[in-house]
Image: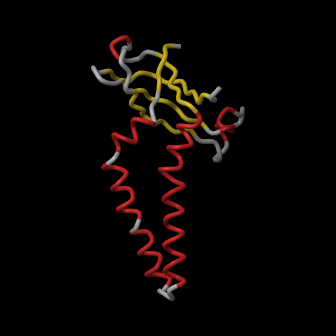
Amino acid sequence: MQEIVRHKGTVLSTSDTHVRVKIVQQSACATCQISSHCQVSESKEKIIDVFDVQSTTYQAGDSVVVYTTRRMAFQALFLGFILPLLLLLVILSLLLWQHTSEGLASLLSLSALVPYYGILWLYRKKVANFATFYIEHT
């Protein structure tokens, strides 16, 4: 059985095609008793669009749980962070191996990420098909 990644959230808005949910992502130490006095603890608000066929059953302000499979979460992590990092490191290494100056090699390897993220943006609907979120009332 696949592991599920769950986050509690609040419905911000609904439409015919999707539900917009706000989740608060907290670090592990954010639940500590002294986290209000510590600079390490943090929490971030994120907005997630859930494309759900029953979007009319949700109202703004509803408390919900947004979930996905761990596999889908890793695929999103791979496409968004790991693959671009590998692309950056490979291009940087090749340019330095060709005796390009460090500044120029750094600039060129960073600029290689622009087409990567551009292509990812162009294919965002295909990417969204396999990186889906699900929603349920709490």
Residue 90, relative to residue 34: is it above or below? below
Residue 129, relative to residue 136: is it above or below? below
Relative image position of residue 87 (x, y in whole percent)? 49, 64
Relative image position of residue 4 (x, y in whole percent)? 60, 28
Give the quadrant of the N terminus: top right
Q: Residue furthest top?
A: 57
Tell which of 113 and 13 is nearer to you.
113
Q: Residue furthest front?
A: 1
Using residue 118 as the reference point, say whether residue 67 is left or right of it: right
In percent of the image, x 50 and y 83: which residue is there? 102
Residue 38, relative to residue 33: is it above or below? below
Relative image position of residue 44 (x, y in whole percent)? 52, 39
Tell which of 63 and 77 is nearer to you.
77
Relative image position of residue 47 (x, y in whole percent)? 42, 34
Using residue 131 as the reference point, say whether residue 26 is left or right of it: right
Tell me the colour scheme of the image.
secondary structure
In percent of the image, x 41 and y 75: which residue is there? 108
Marks counted in the figure total 0
Tell which of 13 and 117 is nearer to you.
117
Residue 30, relative to residue 64: is it above or below? below
Using residue 68 as the reference point, say whether residue 39 is left or right of it: right
Q: Residue furthest left?
A: 16
In percent of the image, x 49 and y 13: which residue is there? 137
